Image (tube, rainbow, N blue to C red):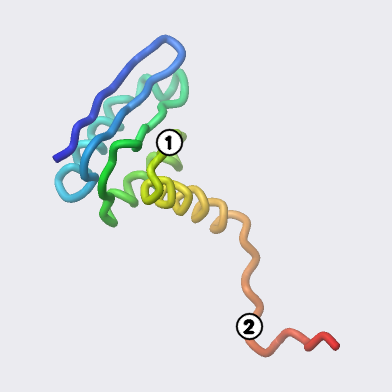
């Protein structure tokens, strides 16, 4: 089960997500995000994940997409925060990471 609560204020919009972000509930959050397009043009939309108890692979993919579209992901729980860090880190890593040197190509330092 998933609960989504949208709070609109003149200077900000917050989306509080509670429960499991998995299976059919991922589509519910995706639809909510799509409907927030007018607000996203005016200001950042914060996605609060403090009360999320589980995120499956499709949920992570949606959160990654939301983040790439300017959504601000917020989490306080240990596992959820790790997921958010992974999403933010994977974007940073894919944009600016240097390719790893092949094994054996580095000269030994002596």
Residue drawn where x is 18% and y is 42% of the image: 25
Name the outermost residue toward the top: 10
First in residue order: circle 1 vs circle 2: 1
Give residue 51's position: percent from left, percent from top.
29, 37
According to the image, label 2 marks what residue? 102
- Image quadrant of residue 67? top left
Location of residue 98 with respect to 25 vertically, above or below? below
Disc tally is 2
Give residue 37's position: percent from left, percent from top.
35, 26
Q: Residues within 10 Å of mark 1 (few under 14, many from 20)?
A: some
Location of residue 85 with respect to 66 vertically, above or below? below
According to the image, label 1 marks what residue? 74
Residue 48 or residue 87, whichever sits in front: 48
Q: Secondary structure at mark 1?
A: strand
Q: Quadrant of the N terminus?
A: top left
Q: Secondary structure at mark 2?
A: loop
Residue 43, labelled with which disc?
Answer: none
Residue drawn where x is 28% and y is 22% of the image: 6
Location of residue 77 with respect to 14 vertically, above or below? below
Residue drawn where x is 56% and y is 57% of the image: 93
Residue 4 placement, left or right of 82: left
Mark pair 1, 2: CA separation: 37 Å
Q: Residues within 10 Å of mark 2 (few under 14, many from 20)?
A: few
Residue 89 placement, left or right of 109: left
Residue 6 or residue 27, whichever sits in front: 6
Residue 68 or residue 2, whichever sits in front: 2
Residue 61 or residue 56, whichever sits in front: 56
Q: Quadrant of the C terminus?
A: bottom right
Name the outermost residue toward the right: 110
Residue drawn where x is 32% and y is 46% of the image: 62
- Image quadrant of residue 2? top left
């Amino acid at each position: 089960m998933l609960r989504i609560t949208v709070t609109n204020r003149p200077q900000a919009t917050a989306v509080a997500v509670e429960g499991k972000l998995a299976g059919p509930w991922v589509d519910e959050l995706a639809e909510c995000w799509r409907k927030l397009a007018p607000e996203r043009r005016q200001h950042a939309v914060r996605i609060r994940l403090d009360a999320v108890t589980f995120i499956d692979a499709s949920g992570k993919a949606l959160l990654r997409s939301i983040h790439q579209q300017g959504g601000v992901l917020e989490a306080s729980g240990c596992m959820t925060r790790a997921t958010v860090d992974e999403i933010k880190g994977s974007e940073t890593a894919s944009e600016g990471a240097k390719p790893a040197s092949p094994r054996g190509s580095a000269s030994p330092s002596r």
